[in-house]
Image (cartoon, rainbow, N blue to C red):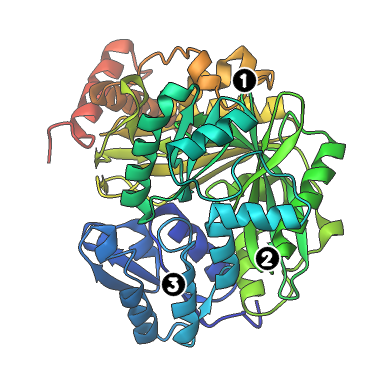
């Protein structure tokens, strides 16, 4: 790009999203600055950046949540802008204000929009005023069990107790009967106070058999917003997304336009700028209700990029610099289908417990229609201090069936040694007939059993990798018209080579 929107940008995040933003900056001729904690000193995002600055200890409050240190690093590096990624300080209105006060550009929405949408009670009020339908519930914060009981009797059980400042699946409990109110309120207030520093709670009807549909929006510097289609996010575990896709198998063109119009109204009602996501809940009858707005780039933004052909981070950088995002509503066309699987260092056969550790080997998939966003490499250690996301695997196909088949193929190509991962879960999901038919909702994992099939042990993974290397070696010889010097490799020689390779692979016993 002849005239990049910024000369240098600091990315106030880590892992795959930091690497993703750096790639966009590099394409636009922008220098990048990384920040890192003690345990991230050798992380990929640090190696990918043009400069890197140490923040402090692993604890987020000492590093990635320390806005003062991040702004100091930006000033020291001579950066003009800060991209927050997602999580950490990305939806912190005070941090956005601090960035502006320091004479830097915050690559995201205005602080007022973050603050307005960050408080879920205030967000509901704004949406009602803008003509966006919200889930029936309390008008504001509830003060105790009696008020919760009154609201629940009005809207009907089950109800959902939600933290006013909640997010990421935290600070929420379903109450199915009056006798559950006391314990649920105590749990939500405790979790919300610990996670968000605010124990305030409100109540809304819990929509059963619901689907979680969200709309990606982009608002230009003039405040005019456009929508870029929807994403289906109903495959969840404890209110946290595991799989996302676009378009949703439950949304037709008429509903898409309706959702898009509501999302645009929501964004413009708060004076929004830059990228954001408006989340809706859809009941079994097809009625949709505003749930919340995420005032940042979403984890699942790649599926939107795959079906629209647009680069959302490029657009973010342009809008933050006061420029047009590079496309208008008439330029948005959904082509084909895309699906994203989040690959975590977790054990799906053991309640998805975290599985931190050293990645002894790491070979990602590839091929047509496959995108892998990651911030890891072989030899790197997945720490216990942060979300154990290893990568996001995204596949595209001319239709949903092709995208699913491609995802199954790509998942099978992964070679990850040293930690347990969620790959067996995703493989089982890709084969489930109800999921393939698009017949699922947010309660899918509570009502369906997936045959995980078990993940290979580290030794089995090393042998599989050795076999793959042997096969690749044989194919190269055949393509070159050559033959092994001592004739065709019989099974005894192949077994010997496999044993030798296995010994020499990471973790195989040789230095």
- The x and y percentages for residue 61 are 28, 62
| Local secondary structure at mark 3 | helix
Label 2 to label 3: alpha-carbon separation: 18 Å
Label 3 to label 1: alpha-carbon separation: 40 Å
Q: Is residue 73 left or right of residue 168?
A: left
Residue shown at the point (37%, 83%) measured from the top left = 77
Find disc 1 in the rendering and name its residue: 435
Q: Quadrant of residue 491?
A: top left
Residue in the foreground of this view, choosing between 429 and 237:
237
Which quadrant: the C terminus? top left
Residue in the foreground of this view, choosing between 295 and 508:
295
Q: Is residue 350 left or right of residue 400?
A: left
Label 1 to label 2: alpha-carbon separation: 36 Å
In the displayed structure, would residue 460 be above or below residue 155? Answer: above
In the displayed structure, would residue 99 be above or below residue 392? Answer: below
Q: Quadrant of residue 290?
A: top right
Residue shown at the point (67%, 19%) measured from the top left = 439
Asked if the residues shown at circle 3 and circle 1 are in contact, with their CB atoms under 8 angstroms apart, the answer is no
- In the rendering, which numbered label is found on residue 95? 3
- In the rendering, which numbered label is found on residue 330? none
Q: Count residues near mark 3 (Cα–Cα under 10 Å), then give few for <14, some for 14-19, many for 20+.
A: many
Q: Quadrant of residue 172?
A: top left
In front: mark 1 or mark 2? 2
Q: Earlier in the sequence, mark 3 or mark 1?
A: 3
Find disc 2 in the rendering and name its residue: 270
Q: Count residues near mark 2 (Cα–Cα under 10 Å), then give few for <14, some for 14-19, many for 20+.
A: many
Residue shown at the point (55%, 71%) measured from the top left = 111
| Local secondary structure at mark 2 | loop
- The x and y percentages for residue 42 are 26, 59
């Amino acid at each position: 790009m002849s005239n990049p929107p910024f000369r240098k940008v600091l990315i106030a995040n880590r892992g795959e999203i930091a690497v993703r933003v750096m790639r966009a900056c590099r394409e636009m001729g922008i220098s990048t600055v990384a920040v890192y904690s003690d345990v991230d000193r050798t992380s990929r995002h640090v190696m990918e950046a043009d400069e890197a600055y140490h923040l402090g200890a692993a604890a987020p409050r000492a590093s990635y949540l320390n806005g003062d240190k991040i702004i100091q690093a930006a000033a020291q590096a001579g950066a003009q802008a800060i991209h927050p990624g997602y999580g950490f300080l990305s939806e912190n209105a005070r941090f956005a204000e601090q960035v502006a006060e320091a004479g830097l550009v915050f690559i995201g929405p205005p602080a007022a929009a973050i603050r307005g949408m960050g408080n879920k009670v205030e967000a509901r009020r704004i949406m009602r005023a803008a003509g966006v339908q919200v889930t029936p519930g309390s008008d504001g914060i509830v003060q105790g069990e009696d008020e919760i009981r009154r609201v629940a009797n009005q809207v009907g059980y089950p109800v959902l107790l939600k933290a006013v400042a909640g997010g990421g699946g935290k600070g929420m409990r379903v109450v199915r009967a009056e006798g559950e109110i006391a314990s649920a309120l105590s749990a939500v207030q405790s979790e919300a106070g610990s996670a968000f520093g605010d124990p305030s709670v409100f109540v809304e009807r819990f929509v059963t058999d619901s689907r979680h549909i969200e709309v990606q929006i982009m608002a230009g510097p003039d405040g005019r917003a456009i929508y870029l289609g929807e994403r289906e996010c109903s495959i969840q575990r404890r209110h946290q997304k595991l799989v996302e896709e676009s378009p949703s198998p439950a949304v037709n063109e008429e509903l898409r336009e309706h959702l898009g119009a509501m999302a645009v109204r929501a964004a413009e009602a708060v004076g929004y700028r830059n990228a954001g996501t408006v989340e809706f809940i859809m009941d079994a009858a097809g009625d949709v209700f505003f749930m919340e707005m995420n005032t940042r780039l979403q984890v699942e933004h790649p599926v939107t990029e795959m079906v629209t052909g647009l680069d959302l981070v490029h657009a973010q950088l342009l809008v933050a610099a006061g420029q047009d995002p590079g496309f208008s509503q008439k330029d948005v066309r959904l082509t084909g289908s895309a699906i994203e699987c989040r690959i975590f260092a977790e054990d799906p056969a053991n309640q998805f417990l975290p599985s931190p550790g050293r990645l002894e080997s790491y070979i990602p998939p590839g091929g047509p229609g496959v995108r892998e966003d990651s911030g890891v490499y072989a030899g790197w250690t997945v720490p216990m201090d942060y979300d154990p996301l290893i990568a996001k695997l995204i596949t595209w196909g001319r239709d949903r069936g092709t995208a699913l088949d491609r995802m199954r193929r790509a998942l099978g190509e992964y070679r990850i040694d040293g930690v347990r991962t969620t790959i067996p879960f995703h493989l089982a999901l890709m084969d489930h007939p109800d999921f393939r038919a698009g017949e699922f909702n947010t309660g899918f994992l509570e009502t369906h059993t997936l045959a995980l099939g078990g993940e290979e042990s580290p030794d089995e993974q090393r042998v599989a990798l050795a076999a793959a290397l042997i096969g690749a070696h044989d194919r190269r010889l055949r393509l070159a018209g050559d033959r092994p010097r001592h004739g065709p490799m019989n099974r005894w020689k192949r077994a010997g080579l496999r044993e030798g390779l296995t010994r020499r692979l990471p973790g195989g016993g040789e230095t």
